[in-house]
């Protein structure tokens, strides 16, 4: 299963997190201003993608890294994240997508990133990660197993109506539950085991895990 790392222009990851995720990834995609996090760590991506409204070094990058693949798209009908996902779908065999820099800074960008992630292929594992929290998408084709997080706070939030939601290893378990934005949610739950499972029969959930 190939893994692709996307670095966006939100809160930059700590170098330790960035290095760890880079070591795990088969492909590394700098998404516009996400370039700066890699530059600061003296690291290079597989490709840099965007309309380059946040990254102002396009000509410098071309000059200094002539072998680096650059996808410059000025299409304003899609976000830079959507452009990057399209590249990943076309050029890799990815089944696991890790997104750094997708949280923080502008709230509209963060919400947009979550909404876009809902439309990614259902069988992909999709994770947003930063130094303070970790967010994973759960679909019927992509259940979630969490290891080594006993005592951590976890919230299970539906962005659409979801049914057949089951959990194992939480303080307040979900058993064939129906969750929805206007109905039941599972906020501020607790991992009571180092082995937590979350499944969804229909819909799309976002699982938020605190690292503190």
Image (cartoon, rainbow, N blue to C red):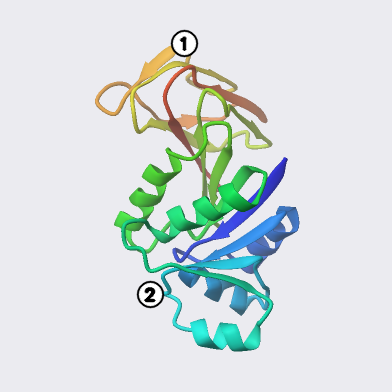
SS category of the residue bearing label 1? loop
Residue at 54% in and 72% down: 35
Q: Which mark is residue 176?
A: 1
44 to the left or right of 75? right
Q: Earlier in the sequence, mark 2 or mark 1?
A: 2
Q: Position of residue 145 (x, y in %)?
A: 63, 30
- Give the image quarter of residue 38: bottom right
Looking at the image, which is closer to me, 162 or 189? 162
Quarter of the figure that contains the N terminus: top right
SS category of the residue bearing label 2? loop
Residue at 48% in and 11% down: 175
The residues tagged by marks 2 and 1 sit, at their Cα atoms, a distance apart of 45 Å
Report crowding for label 1: few under 14, some 14 to 19, many 20 or more residues within 10 A (C-alpha): some
Q: Which residue occupies the extreme right position in the image?
A: 23
Q: Which mark is residue 39?
A: none
Q: Which residue is mark 2?
A: 53
- Give the image quarter of residue 13: bottom right
Q: Which residue occupies the extreme top position in the image?
A: 176
Q: Position of residue 112 (x, y in %)?
A: 35, 50
Could you tell me if the residues under marks 2 and 1 are in contact, i.e. CB atoms within 8 Å?
no
Is residue 111 visible from the viewing direction of this image? yes
Q: In this picture, is 80 found above or below 67?
A: above
Q: Position of residue 11 (x, y in %)?
A: 46, 64
Q: Which residue occupies the extreme left position in the image?
A: 182
Is residue 193 visible from the viewing direction of this image? no
- Give the image quarter of residue 79: bottom left
Looking at the image, which is closer to me, 194 or 117? 117
Q: In this picture, is 201 found above or below 153?
A: above
């Amino acid at each position: 299963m190939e893994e692709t790392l996307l670095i966006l222009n939100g809160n930059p990851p700590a170098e330790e997190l960035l290095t760890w995720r880079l070591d795990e990834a088969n492909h590394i995609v700098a998404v516009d201003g996400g370039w700066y996090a890699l530059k600061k760590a003296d690291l290079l991506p597989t490709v840099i993608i965007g309309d380059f409204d946040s990254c102002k070094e396009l000509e410098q990058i071309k000059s200094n890294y002539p072998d680096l693949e650059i996808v410059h798209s000025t299409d304003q009908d899609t976000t830079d994240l959507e452009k990057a996902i399209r590249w990943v779908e076309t050029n890799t065999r990815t089944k696991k997508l890790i997104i750094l820099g997708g949280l923080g800074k502008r709230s509209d960008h963060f919400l947009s990133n979550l909404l876009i992630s809902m439309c990614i292929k259902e069988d992909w594992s999709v994770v947003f990660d930063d130094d303070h929290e970790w967010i994973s998408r759960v679909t019927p084709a992509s259940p979630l197993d969490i290891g080594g997080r006993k005592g951590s706070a976890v919230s299970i939030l539906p962005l659409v109506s979801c049914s057949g939601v089951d959990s194992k290893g939480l303080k307040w378990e979900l058993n064939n539950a129906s969750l929805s934005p206007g109905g039941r949610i599972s906020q501020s739950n607790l991992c009571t085991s180092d082995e937590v499972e979350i499944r969804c029969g229909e819909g799309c959930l976002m699982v938020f895990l605190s690292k503190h």
